[in-house]
Image (cartoon, grey):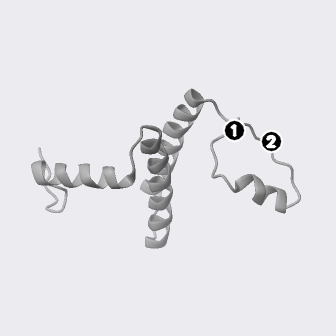
């Protein structure tokens, strides 16, 4: 069973003297793989304890999210603006409000 990997991973595997088996995903398979990868990376972010690990895992989530929104014709600037709009309308999470 395989998984979606970053573009340069096959070359890194080859540089170690191994031969990676790869294929290019169809659009539908790519969409599903991105969703799976997002869940994987968010799980790793949740489990990260050290600040440096949190940063690395957040970068992975960001990269997958960038690919997901790009498939729909958006950029991370669009996401930032949408987040800013929602924060203005509904607030953010800075106040640590818990609703019982």
List x then y, in percent, for residue 99: 12, 46
Q: Residue furthest front?
A: 73
List x then y, in percent, for residue 43: 47, 49
Figure quadrant of the C terminus: top left
Q: Is residue 61 left or right of residue 8?
A: left
Q: Nearer the viewer, residue 69 or 94?
A: 69
Say whether disc 2 or disc 1 marks the residue closer to the N-terminus: 1
Up/down of 21 relative to 91, above or below? above
Up/down of 37 relative to 12, above or below? above
Q: CA–CA distance between discs 2 and 1? A: 9 Å
Q: Is residue 11 left or right of residue 84?
A: right
List x then y, in percent, for residue 82: 25, 49
What residue sits 21% from the left and 55% below the top? 84
Q: Nearer the viewer, residue 62 or 27?
A: 27
What residue sits 25% from the left and 53% below the top? 81
List x then y, in percent, for residue 64: 49, 49
What residue sits 89% from the left and 59% below the top? 17
What residue sits 69% from the left and 56% below the top? 8
Residue 61 is labelled as: none
Q: On the image, numbered disc 2 is attached to which residue?
A: 21
Secondary structure, mark 1, is loop
Up/down of 96 relative to 1, above or below? below
Q: Residue furthest top?
A: 28
Q: On the image, numbered disc 1 is attached to which residue?
A: 2
């Amino acid at each position: 069973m395989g998984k979606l990997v970053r573009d340069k991973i096959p070359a890194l595997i080859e540089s170690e003297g191994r031969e990676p088996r790869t294929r290019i995903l169809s659009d539908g398979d790519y969409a599903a793989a991105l969703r799976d990868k997002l869940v994987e990376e968010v799980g790793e972010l949740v489990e990260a304890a050290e600040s440096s690990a949190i940063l690395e895992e957040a970068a992975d989530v960001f990269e997958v999210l960038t690919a997901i929104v790009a498939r729909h014709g958006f950029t991370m600037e669009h996401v930032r603006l949408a987040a800013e709009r929602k924060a203005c309308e509904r607030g953010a999470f800075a106040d640590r409000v818990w609703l019982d």
